[in-house]
Image (spheres, coloured by chain):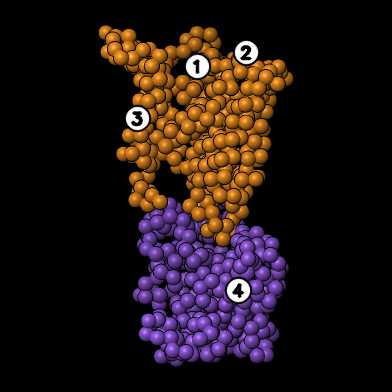
Chain colours: A orange, B purple
Amino acid sequence: MIDWGAIFSNAAVELISPTTAAYALAALGLAVHFGYTGLLNFGQAGFMALGAYGYAISILTFGFPVWGAFLVGVGASVIFALILGIPTLRLRADYLAIVTIAAAEIVRLLFTTNTFAAVTGSANGLSGYKNEFAALNPLAEGSYGFGPFENNAYDTWLRIVAWSIVILAALLVWQVMRSPWGRVIKGIREDEDAVRALGKNVYAYKMQSLILGGVFGTVAGMIFALPRAVVPSNYQTTLTFFIYAILLLGGAATVLGPIIGSMIFWVLLSFFSGFIARAVEAGWLPFMTAIQGGQLRFILVGVAIMLIVIFRPQGIFGNKKELAFVR
Amino acid sequence: MSVNIVPTSPTGPSGKPVKTVDMHIGDAAPGCKKRDPILVVDGVRRSFGGLTAVDVDHVEVPRGAITALIGPNGAGKTTLFNLLTGFDKPDSGAWTFDGRPIAGVPAFKVARMGQIRTFQLTKALGLLTVMDNMLLGAKGQSGENFFRALLPFLWRKQETANEAKALDLLTRFKLDAKKDDYAASLSGGQRKLLEMARALMSDPTLVMLDEPMAGVNPALTQSLLDHILNLKAQGMTVLFVEHDMHMVRHIADWVIVMAEGKVVAEGDPHEVMKNPAVIDAYLGQHHDEDIGEDQPEHIEALKELLDDER
């Protein structure tokens, strides 16, 4: 018989897991890029890789403190955004898409290549950089929380930091998007020539947006790296597409959309994987092996996202009124 | 020394617009000097491959008047507009706005100097509200800096003042009832009005309108004409591209005619219509031959050109 309790409790764990927070933050960065500014950034995985590696290498190779490693990661992503933006932001939006998808792959391959294995760990990646972050933990040893949300001190500390950053980032986005700055940004999404004709330096605004969303992606990469090892294969283009899926699920030009979207995405993913694994075990799906079952969850998540996009294209938090004017 | 008559009301006692007269020095020939030019263009050339779209030797736009830029399709009017506003770069040439050289200056800086343009295909920002569209037009907003945007008390006061100004303009353009709607929900004519109102948020000195009447129904045309005349009444200079001859005759103080990239004629709207170069430009070299019944649009255009104002 299927243990429904275990399936649901495993799914519930994902609700506040650091990975969910990391995806939420990366999706919030994409919301700034794509939802608000109309920049087609397909290289969010590259920004996340820079954050994860920037943090891990700073600590392991150079022995930086946590804040120093954090700044290295953020600095790397600002430079990355400038390199991407300077040649492409003057061009049409699709060029940025092409350049970002390629640049993110370049970043991943640079971290994978054996040439820098001493620093990057090549395909095996890096681990053993968690002590510095754990040392900052003010919580006493023991377990915190209740039910599926019960964790040890380190995991609780990580969750508190991760979700605090997500909340701060969400408040930041909410505040700037209701300011005159956000109005210019949204105007650029609608028609950048019109905004230029009104005396706004469109190029500078697009660059600021690219950097802001990229920094969110970078910090998300750090949060993503803290509960696991940094492995280059985690930062493939599929990561960017999962984040786009989360963004569209929640609503592209919303603040809460990426956060709730990430929760739904991870809870669904965990639920389907738990359900299918146990269903195969229980012999409900005789035509399927356990390995095939592991793949099926992505198919089911894909179907779920398709249904949402077809029947609610503005996302969960998107404004229904906007739908009447979809171009 | 300016002799421009700036009327306080767009229309005189007879109900007809008060025309600004006596703006040029010497004969009304292509490239003639103006007493008080706001825009002076010198030797601007722009070619696309083998096609020379714009080749203007010299032209001056008089200050405080309504100048129409007319010409057949493909004459280079919109290209010239794009060049003068920094949206396109010429192969060669220079031009000054208000005495300042602005060749090579990016579009957003040109706009900040007070030379604001609209587009032939309206660029209302669809998924912004009408009010947000208007507020975007205001100049020098401190809240448009990212870091200051985080601290609302730094820009709240300015925002409130801009909102009041925007509401005032929207009321004039009869769009105030729509202020919280998405611009995408407006009709084509209302979008033209919104674009013009938005341009006025920055208190421009020169307003450049690219085909303000294109796609606007006749009922709204009259109101748009009044708005353009009002701009002049408030001391702004207007330069517009238009195909509708009735409208040009009705409101323009000065007409510049382009054909095949060059300025072929200039002058008072009534005089310029009789200029053989203009008739050639519009109807081709053989307008005096029998053009036959199968080209009624030519007859219509000819009638329109030679038709005196009723």
**Sequence-first disc among 1 and 3:** 1
Mark 4 neighbour density, 10 Å: few (under 14) some (14–19) many (20 or more): many
The answer for which chain carries disc 2 is: A
**Sequence-first disc among 1 and 2:** 2
Residue B261 circle label: 4
Mark 2 neighbour density, 10 Å: few (under 14) some (14–19) many (20 or more): few
Residue at screen point 68% across, 77% down:
B58
For disc 3, the marked residue is A303
| Cα distance in 3D space between marks 3 and 2 | 38 Å
| Cα distance in 3D space between marks 4 and 1 | 71 Å
Report x, y in % for residue B239.
Answer: 56, 74
For disc 2, the marked residue is A128
Residue at screen point 54% across, 47% down:
A93
- Indicate which label's residue lies in the foreground, 4 or 1: 4
On screen, B308 above or below A278? below
Q: Quadrant of residue A14?
A: top left
